[in-house]
Amino acid sequence: MNILDELNEIVKDYRDGITLTEDSVFAQLGFDSLDRVELIMAVEEKFDITFPDDIQIETVKELVDKINELKA
């Protein structure tokens, strides 16, 4: 399973029926700042990584890139 597929599995808990693509923008999908924090926490747990406290993620592509960077 690739990162995008795994993110889609995580997102089902927040927005059932949404399918993320790398072009997806979280704000346009209805994710407010609290939703994003919860998503980041779930991603950290799933991938066993830690994001910087000041991380600003607006798009799925930014999130995928940051996950790849932290997993390397």
Image (cartoon, rainbow, N blue to C red):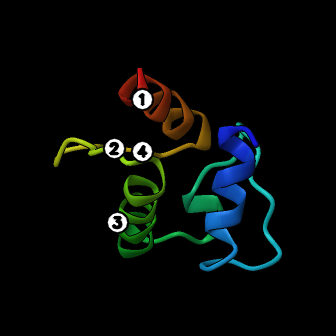
Classify mark 1: helix, strand or loop.
helix
Q: Which residue is mark 4?
A: 57
Q: Which residue is mark 3?
A: 37
Mark 2 and mark 4 lie on one chain; the one further toward the N terminus is 2
Mark 3 and mark 4 lie on one chain; the one further toward the N terminus is 3
| Numbered marks: total | 4
**Residue type at numbered disc 1:** Lys
Mark closer to the observer (3, 1): 1
Q: Going 46% across and 47% down the picture, which residue do you hit?
A: 47
Specify the quadrant of the image occupied by residue 54.
Answer: top left
The picture places residue 36, in percent across and down from the top left corner, at 42, 64
Q: Nearer the viewer, residue 29 or 51?
A: 51
Disc marking residue 71? 1
Specify the quadrant of the image occupied by residue 15.
Answer: bottom right
Q: Going 76% across and 44% down the picture, which residue do you hit?
A: 21
Q: Which residue is mark 2?
A: 49
The picture places residue 68, in percent across and down from the top left corner, at 49, 27
